[in-house]
Image (spheres, grey):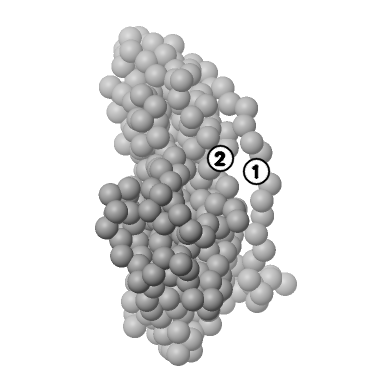
Amino acid sequence: MTDAVTDADTHAAGDVEILLAEPRGFCAGVDRAIEIVERALTKFGAPIYVRHEIVHNTYVVNDLKSKGAIFIEDLADVPPGSTLVFSAHGVSKAVQDEARARGFEIFDATCPLVTKVHVEVAKLAKEGYEFIMIGHKGHPEVEGTMGQLDHGIHLVEDVADVATVQPLQSEKLAVVTQTTLSVDDAAEISAAVRRRFPLIREPKMQDICYATQNRQDAVKIMSPQVDVLIVVGSPTSSNSNRLAELARKLGVQSYMVDHADELRPEWLQGKSRVGLTAGASAPEVLVKQVIDRVKEMGAVSVRKMDGIQETVKFPLPKGLKLS
């Protein structure tokens, strides 16, 4: 790639500055999940089977496929005696039970922050609680959390759903949240839940993960400073979609790209500052490729925002230490 700026590029984009969000990209849960698959491949050899995409990013999934990972949805597609990894989003009790019954060597790459929600649900269910879950229907994390119980957990996707949800009782009712939601949307829905069920039990700490919160906070700080925001992330990535949505709500044009080739020169037309961030499942190599592409379109400088430095690291499962 070349950093040369042609007259046509300059005319189209002007002397564009790229403002780089901090933090952005991989979170500790994604780092851990990818490392679990890579270590399993090193220790046990290919193929390693992964139930659902390990994280919602096309580049990451394709890279692991090239190394010998096979992604499946149905455990019947996994040969007997195989090594199986559960994705970072978590799985239901039924999937866990079936995997054990089939005798697979299992490594659980569920993000520990999702596991924390599962543990809370199991604990409170034993005390007789029902649950309101705030989340997106069909998302694997939601299916995994709701699948921790065979009854008594009710999904609400928006404020309107709160008015129609019908738990069997409201004396022992608790709320849990998908970890990758919009912080502001989740707060609005939670407020509606509290108005309808004033006695509802809330988690000691909110369920939305630190990385989701930090990346959304960075977009809030960045948005007034840029003319357009590019979010690096795959269409299936909940937290990446929320970043793009948030910028639009703040009045900034926003586009999400899975890779640099999806960038369009017209997005930069008449713009002098481009914001750039990445969802928690998007690798930094894709950010660098987008920077190179925007430079080809006329950007002349890159400036990194000040922001939170994330130092969280989650331990790997036993049995994956490499000698």
Q: Is residue 216 left or right of residue 311?
A: left
Name the one closer to the observer, 54 or 297.
54
Counting every numbered tag in the picture gives: 2
Query: In the image, what residue type sits under mark 2?
Result: Asn
Using the numbered discs, state the Cα–Cα distance from disc 1 to disc 2 in whole angstroms.
Answer: 9 Å
Callout 2: helix, strand or loop? helix
Numbered mark located on residue 215 in the image: none
User: Foreground residue, 206 or 159?
Assistant: 159
Q: Which residue is mark 2?
A: 214
Identify which residue is drawn at 37% across, 15% down. Answer: 271
The answer to whether marks 1 and 2 mark residues whose Cβ atoms lie closer than 8 Å is yes
Considering every residue shown, the one lying at the far right of the view is: 323
Q: Is residue 282 above or below residue 49?
A: above
Q: Residue at x 34, y 83 (%)?
A: 76
Residue 3 visible from this viewpoint: no
Q: Which residue is mark 1?
A: 310
Which of the two residues, 15 or 136, is positioned nearer the viewer here? 136
Residue drawn at x 53%, y 42% is 213
Q: Position of residue 183 (x, y in %)?
A: 47, 43
The percent position of residue 233, horizontal first and vertical second, equals 41, 44
Q: Residues within 10 Å of mark 2 (few under 14, many from 20)?
A: some
**Residue type highlighted by circle 1:** Glu
Q: What is the x, y in percent for residue 311?
A: 68, 47
Q: Is residue 266 above or below residue 259?
A: above
Q: Position of residue 223 (x, y in %)?
A: 45, 25
- Indicate the quadrant containing the C terminus: top left, top right, bottom left or bottom right: bottom right
Q: Residues within 10 Å of mark 1 (few under 14, many from 20)?
A: some
Figure quadrant of residue 149 = bottom left
